[in-house]
Image (cartoon, rainbow, N blue to C red):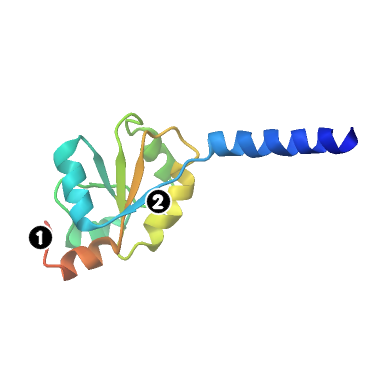
């Protein structure tokens, strides 16, 4: 009986965590462009404002991951609209995902390789 109770508690814990678990999807530049064509998205550049001024992807909004008000700015986004994050190489955007996963966003995407790969592939950036 004791074993059945322990198994039941373990199963409930796993089920609860699976229900609450949110994940992001790593997407290529091609996939991002298709997603932007198909539905409204919020494109978020999490680099510093100086990096953003040097060049960014069209229609991106800059929310600096290192700024003191990062969470406030993220909370101001529309959670019913998917979010695509990018940074220089993908490291900062990956760190952002754990913070965004605690919020109720419909979907979270991470641009593979960041803006560096975007530029390397010959895609346009804007100043």
Compared with 109, 17 (above or below) is above
Residue drawn at point x = 50 percent, y = 39 percent: 102
Rendered residue at 62%/33% (across/down)? 16
| Left or right position of 47 against 120 | right
Residue 83 rendering spot, x and y as whole percentages: 31, 41
Q: How packed is label 1: few (under 14 Cα within 10 Å), some, or many (20 or more)? A: few
Question: Which structural element holds mark 1?
Answer: loop
Q: Position of residue 67 (x, y in %)?
A: 40, 51
Are the residues at dot 2 and dot 1 in contact (C-beta closer than 8 Å)? Answer: no
Q: Nearer the viewer, residue 66 or 27?
A: 27
Q: Is residue 55 left or right of residue 96?
A: left
Question: Looking at the image, which residue is at 33% across and 29% down?
Answer: 80
Which residue lies under the disc numbered 2?
67
Which one is in front in this view, the residue at disc 2 or the one at disc 1?
1
Q: Which mark is residue 101?
A: none
67 or 88: nearer the viewer: 88
- The residue shown at (25%, 60%) is 50
Left/right of residue 49 with respect to residue 16 in the rendered view = left
SS at circle 2: loop
Q: In the figure, 43 relative to 8: above or below?
A: below
Mark closer to the chain start, 2 or 1? 2
Visible in this render: residue 69? Answer: no
Q: Position of residue 96 (x, y in %)?
A: 42, 51
The N terminus: image quadrant: top right
Residue furthest out toward the bottom: 120
Give neighbour class at mark 2: few <14, some 14-19, many 20+ (Cα, 10 Å): few
Task: For marks 2 and 1, give the CA distance.
Answer: 26 Å
- On the image, numbered disc 1 is attached to which residue? 124
Asked if residue 109 shows in the view, the reply is yes
Q: Report the label total.
A: 2
């Amino acid at each position: 009986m004791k074993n059945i109770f322990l198994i039941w508690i373990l199963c409930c814990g796993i089920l609860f965590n699976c229900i609450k678990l949110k994940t992001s999807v790593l997407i290529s530049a091609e996939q991002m462009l298709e997603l932007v064509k198909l539905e409204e998205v919020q494109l978020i550049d999490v680099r510093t404002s100086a990096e953003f001024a040097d060049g960014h992807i069209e229609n991106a909004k800059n929310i600096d991951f290192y700024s003191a008000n990062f969470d406030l700015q993220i909370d101001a986004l529309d959670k019913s609209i998917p979010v695509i994050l990018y940074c220089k190489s993908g490291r900062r955007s990956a760190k952002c995902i754990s913070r965004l996963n605690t919020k109720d966003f419909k979907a979270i995407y991470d641009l593979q390789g960041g803006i560096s790969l975007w530029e390397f592939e010959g895609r346009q950036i804007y100043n």
